[in-house]
Image (spheres, rainbow, N blue to C red):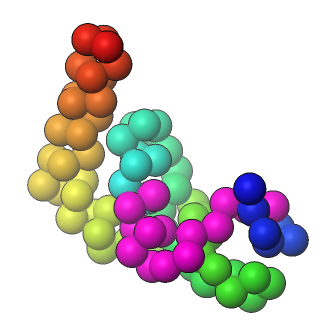
């Protein structure tokens, strides 16, 4: 649940936001989510589809990490 007036999901640290960004791209391969920002209303981090792609996400995409994690997630669900 969000403690932010915007009702967006909150992340308490930059690292937590980066991990969420990667997880979203693993779960939703066509996600438009690009980066995160610090909210003026609550002071926590939120994800956004605006702005430049975060370097962590860009590196994960270029290294094929998103595809690998997606494939792993697929087989985990299929074999469970």
Residue 62, image quadrant: bottom left
Q: Position of residue 77 (x, y in %)?
A: 34, 19
Q: Residue at x 13, y 55 (%)?
A: 63
Q: Is residue 10 visible?
A: yes
The C terminus, quarter of image: top left
Locate residue 12, reporting x and y percent: 56, 76
Going by the image, does 30 lie left or right of 37? left
Q: Is residue 34 magenta?
A: no
Q: Quadrant of residue 10?
A: bottom right
In depth, the one of 20 and 28 nearer the eye is: 20
Q: Residue furthest left?
A: 63
**In the displayed structure image, the side of residue 37 where residue 34 appears, left or right:** left
Query: Which corner quadrant holds the N terminus?
Result: bottom right
Of residues 6 and 80, the one drawn nearer to the viewer in this rendering: 80
Stretch of the chain drawn in magenta: 7-20
Q: Quadrant of residue 78?
A: top left
11 part of magenta stretch: yes
Q: Position of residue 23 (x, y in %)?
A: 40, 49
Looking at the image, is 78 positioned above or below residue 62? above
Residue at the (46%, 37%) spot, across then down: 28
* Residue drawn at point x = 46 percent, y = 47 percent: 24
Residue extending farthest to the top is: 79
| Horizontal and vertical percent position of residue 25 | 40, 46
Left or right: 32 in relation to 10: left
Q: Is residue 67 visible?
A: no
Image mark count: 0
The residue lying at 86 percent from left, 71 percent from top is 5
């Amino acid at each position: 649940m969000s403690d932010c007036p915007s009702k967006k999901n909150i992340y308490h640290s930059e690292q937590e936001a980066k991990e969420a960004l990667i997880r979203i791209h693993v779960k939703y391969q066509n996600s438009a989510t690009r980066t995160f920002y610090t909210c003026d209303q609550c002071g926590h981090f939120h994800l956004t589809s605006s702005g430049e792609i975060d370097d962590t996400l860009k590196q994960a995409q270029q290294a094929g990490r998103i595809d690998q994690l997606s494939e792993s997630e697929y087989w985990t669900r299929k074999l469970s």
